[in-house]
Image: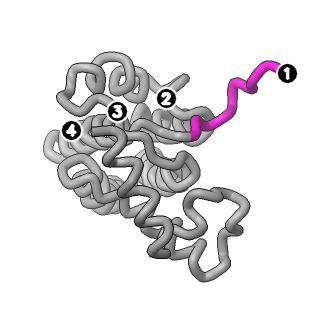
Amino acid sequence: MAPSLLTFPNPVNDVAARAVAGGVVIMSVTALVSHAMWITIPLAYGFVARLASGPRFSPLGRTATMLIAPRLKRYEKLVPGPPKRFAQGIGAIFTVTAMVLWLVGDGTASRIVLAVLVVPALLESALGLCVGCKMFAFLMRYGIISEEICDECSDIFSAKARARRAARALQDS
């Protein structure tokens, strides 16, 4: 059976995800500084497209995976896909909300929502700290998200999982 066009990749290249986050920061700050809130339209589209199918239909996602990440020193660092998809969903909620607020004429509220989004996007891009992924892990830890969603994530807090990740990191280097 052929894969669906609306499948999310698993695993995900974290280097490309960080590049996408950098693009989100640049676009969001540009919109905020220049009051060009129409930029929320391509931002919202990008998050919804990445939520649905990863980078496949997202211009920013395609640019990050095909042009930016391959040129970076550490080209590939694979991480589980479900937490990244969860993070894209949160980004979609924020950008669609900002876009709708702008479209109905509430530019101030739109800018506030977009400014809030800049913080986790900057943390992801600059430090590799995925706030949505941390939320996903928290929700899994407390049984709100089923362990079946992401086997690799289900024991993310255990010593055994940390040991496996450390062994994989040694193999990769």
Where's residue 135, x and y in %? 47, 69
The residue pinned by badge 2 equals 55
For this orientation, the residue located farthest to the left is 33
Name the amino acid, label 4.
Ile
Residue name at image x 49 percent, y 65 percent = 161
For this orientation, the residue located farthest to the right is 1
Where's residue 56, x and y in %? 54, 24
Circle 4 SS class: helix
Indicate the quadrant containing the N terminus: top left, top right, bottom left or bottom right: top right
Name the amino acid, label 3.
Glu
Indicate the quadrant containing the C terminus: top left, top right, bottom left or bottom right: top left
Distance between mark 4 and mark 1 Cα atoms: 39 Å
Circle 1 SS class: loop
Asked whether residue 121 is in view, the answer is yes
Name the amino acid, label 2.
Pro
Distance between mark 1 and mark 2 Cα atoms: 21 Å
Q: Earlier in the sequence, mark 4 or mark 3?
A: 4
Q: Is residue 67 magenta?
A: no
Where's residue 127, x and y in %? 20, 54
Distance between mark 3 and mark 2 Cα atoms: 15 Å
Mark 4 vs mark 1: give the one in front. Answer: 1
Colouring convention used in this rendered image of the protein: one colour
Q: Earlier in the sequence, mark 4 or mark 2?
A: 4
The residue pinned by badge 4 equals 26
The residue pinned by badge 1 equals 1
The span picked out in magenta is: 1-10
* Residue 169 vertical placement versus 26 (above, below): below
Label 3 CA crowd tier, 10 Å (few <14, some 14–19, many 20+)? some
The foreground one among 59 and 127 is: 127
Distance between mark 4 and mark 3 Cα atoms: 22 Å
Residue name at image x 46 percent, y 34 percent = 46
